[in-house]
Amino acid sequence: MPDDRSAGAPAPLYGFQPPVGTPYGLEVTTIEDFFDRHDDWPWNPPRPGRATFHYLILVTSGELLHDVDHITRTVRAGQWLWVRPGHTQCWYPPGEARGPFILFEQDVLHPETARLLTPATAHDAPAVLTLGADRHWAEQTAFQLLDEHRALGRRPLELHHALRRRLLEALLLRLACGQDTAAPPPPSDRRASTYRQFLDALEIHFCSLHHVDDYARLLGCTARTLTRAAHAAAGTTARAVIDGRRLLEARRLLGTGRTAKAVAAHLGFPDTANFGRFFRNRTGLPPAAYAARQAHQDTESGCPALPRAHLDGIAQVSDA
């Protein structure tokens, strides 16, 4: 169970555990109902955390503040907040904010839909979404999903879940299209397929594998092939993608109380000095200065965060 013994403790990682009777990796509620049910979650005690699943919130009225990877986002009426798995997040009391609140695991999506949504579910995809022409239809789909979720018992469980699943997928596709996020090329595009396999491998091994050659051997291709795939898909090098993922994790960990020495060891750097050069060259700040700045910003904002004890919808997996 998470606790508040140390404000500088690493952010805990939470897994999906919906209330009893909620089927198959998808829970739908509202901001106001969630807050009413949990007066001590997730606004107290003030501690950041990460989750293994997606948070998707539509603000229909009021204004919601939420920190994602140590940046405070303001979500206004008509906008969406999408927090992907692994992001460090910190919650504020919702105040007058209202709207549907959707929690779902990646595996609830059909594989083909998940492929189409790859850009929208990526780590670096925007946290706050503002839709154009699809705004009305996306909002209607969200409320249809909420109604169907609340209709548990009205129809056979498998049919109930099939409807929820398809409504969720329709909603996410509308969000992706509304953001002008292009779907990745089909699997027949060899470079696109190689790049997606590279990203999947990187998520698993970024702490232990740090060179392009490492991933080329893992995927059964050459380093040149991997670099060409990264350039075609993302306009950058495979080396830059690896470094970017390590840097993101370093920022997350430093922002939640880890020392530079602990982060260096976690990410596989040979020593703290080597990590310090890596971090400073890419951010302009030494790790200690970055951590101090983040701590000061968190103190000034009084940012509340994830919970002290297991509650509906969340269960701690591990400290990460």
Image (cartoon, rainbow, N blue to C red):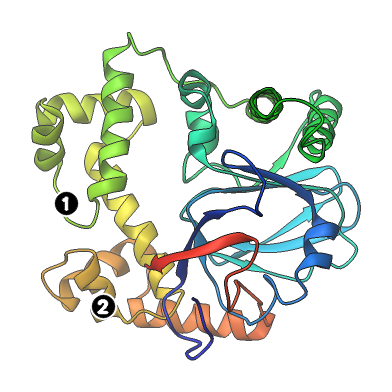
Give the residue at x 45% y 20%.
184
Tell me how far mark 2 sits from mark 1, CA to CA.
17 Å
Image depth: mark 2 or mark 1 in front: 2
Please state which of residues 24 and 187 is positioned toward the viewer in this rendering.
24
Give the residue at x 50% y 38%.
106
Answer with left or right where residue 98 lies relative to residue 192. right
- Which callout, 2 or 1, points at the residue further toward the start of the chain? 1
Whole-percent x, y for residue 128 in the image: 68, 47
Q: Which residue is mark 1?
A: 210
- 53, above or below 110, in the image: below
Please state which of residues 156 and 146 is positioned toward the viewer in this rendering.
156
User: How many residues crowd around disc 1 within 10 Å: few (fewer than 14), some, or many (20 or more)?
Assistant: some
Mark number, residue 280: none
Residue occupying the far top of the picture: 188
Whole-percent x, y for residue 307 in the image: 60, 74
Amino acid tagged 1: His
Q: Which residue is mark 2?
A: 262
Give the residue at x 54% y 33%.
108
- 93, above or below 202, in the image: below
Answer with left or right where residue 56 lies relative to residue 88. right
* Marks 2 & 1, CB-CB < 8 Å contact: no
Quadrant of the image occupied by residue 170 = top right
| Secondary element type, mark 1 | loop
| Secondary element type, mark 2 | helix
